[in-house]
Image (cartoon, rainbow, N blue to C red):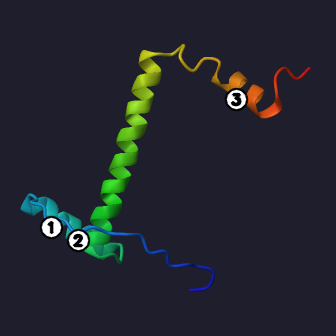
Amino acid sequence: MIGTKLVRVPTERVNLSMDRTALSAARAAAQANGMSLSEWLSKAAWDRAIWEAARHSAEQSRRHPDELANWEDERLDRLFGGDQA
């Protein structure tokens, strides 16, 4: 492929138990996407971890709306050194 770069990331071997129906669905999804089962499960785990982090962040923002109220102003102050008139 032109313009693509293969990046290898460290992996760790794990053993896990899965519901047979879930495993069958994962195998089918991996095959449909041209991925190995390991690749597909890794991506699915990563996608879910990101989703959970976003959900947690949204919940924290909902519980503490004033905590980040001045975040944008503070960020601009740090970037540009204080008040810009």
Q: Is residue 66 left or right of residue 34?
A: right
Please report the residue visible at 31 percent of the width from the left and 63 percent of the height from the top.
Answer: 42
Using residue 37 as the reference point, say whether residue 19 is left or right of it: left
Q: Secondary structure at mark 1?
A: helix
Query: Mark 3 packing: few (<14 Cα in 10 Å), some, or many (20+)?
Result: few
Q: Is residue 30 above or below residue 83?
A: below
User: Residue at the location (39% across, 39% down)?
Assistant: 53
Q: Residue furthest bottom?
A: 1
- The amino acid beneath tag 3 is Arg
Callout 3–callout 1 Cβ contact below 8 Å: no
Name the image quarter holding the C terminus.
top right
Closer-to-camera residue (21/7): 7
Question: Which numbered dot is residue 24?
Answer: 1
- Residue pictured at 39% horizontal, 34% vertical: 55
Tell me the element at label 3. helix
Residue 4, image x, y percentages: 58, 79
| Front in this rendered view, residue 28 or 83 | 83
- Amino acid bearing label 1: Ser
Q: Is residue 24 above or below residue 5?
A: above
Q: Horizontally, is 68 left or right of 59 in the view?
A: right
**Front disc: 3 or 1:** 3
Spot occupied by residue 23 in the image (x, y as percentages of width and height) = 15, 64
Q: Amino acid at mark 2?
A: Ala
Residue 31's spot in the image, x, y percent? Answer: 28, 76
Is 50 or 33 nearer to us in this picture?
Answer: 50
Q: Which residue, given by chain and number where applicable, does mark 3 sit on?
A: 75
List the residue tagged with mark 2. Answer: 28
